[in-house]
Amino acid sequence: MDSHEHVVVFVALVIAAAYQASSLQRRCLARCRGPLSRIFHGWREGTSGAFRMGVDNGVWCVGCCIGLVVALLVLGAMSVLWMALFFVAVTLEKTAPFGTSLSRVLVPSLAAGALIWAL
């Protein structure tokens, strides 16, 4: 890897760690983990209503894991192992009972990964 690629990976990991630590990510994760309540309380009739509900749900879900996706784009391009690890992290964060706690563990892990990568 040349020096530019190292910088890109470092920056992506720092951005991912910062986003994982943000209140926006926690708010999006809370909404993404409970889509059933949005269906009951935000029901819209017809095809256009179903489309709107799907877009709303998609926006919350993208918001909860965009930081991890940024890191995945730079690391996953290099290794199937990284792709699998990020897949497991995103899946557990969104579905497991301990998902919100996992989110807090990912912040120092991503930050440490950025520091290790910088060395």
Image (cartoon, rainbow, N blue to C red):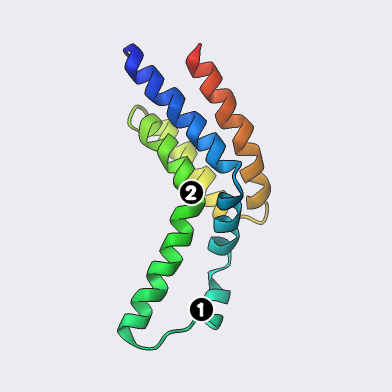
Tell me: 59 left or right of 32: left
Q: Residue furthest front?
A: 23
User: What amino acid type is highlighted by mark number 2?
Assistant: Cys
Picture coordinates of residue 67, whole percent (x, y): 48, 42
Task: Identify the residue at horizontal 43%, vertical 31% (top origin).
Answer: 12
Picture coordinates of residue 116, whole percent (x, y): 54, 17
Residue 83 placement: quadrant: top left
**How far apart are the two marked residues, 2 and 1, measured between alpha carbons?**
21 Å
Q: Which mark is residue 65?
A: 2
Q: Earlier in the sequence, mark 2 or mark 1?
A: 1
Q: Residues within 10 Å of mark 2 (few under 14, many from 20)?
A: many
Picture coordinates of residue 79, whole percent (x, y): 37, 29
Picture coordinates of residue 113, whole percent (x, y): 54, 24
Up the image or down, 41 lies above or below 62; here it is: below
Q: Secondary structure at mark 1?
A: helix
Task: Identify the residue at horizontal 40%, vertical 19% (top origin).
Answer: 7
Task: Identify the residue at horizontal 42%, vertical 85% (top origin).
Answer: 44
Up the image or down, 109 lies above or below 38; here it is: above
Does residue 65 show up?
A: yes
Q: Residue furthest bottom?
A: 45
Residue 36 placement: quadrant: bottom right
Tell me: 10 left or right of 30: left
Residue 56 placement: quadrant: bottom left
User: What amino acid type is highlighted by mark number 1?
Assistant: Ile
- Between 18 and 61, the one lying in front of the other is 18
Residue identified by numbered label 1: 39
Q: Secondary structure at mark 2?
A: helix
Does residue 95 show up?
A: no
Which of the image's four quarters has the N terminus? top left
Q: Residues within 10 Å of mark 1 (few under 14, many from 20)?
A: some
Task: Identify the residue at horizontal 67%, vertical 51% (top origin).
Answer: 98
Q: Which mark is residue 79?
A: none
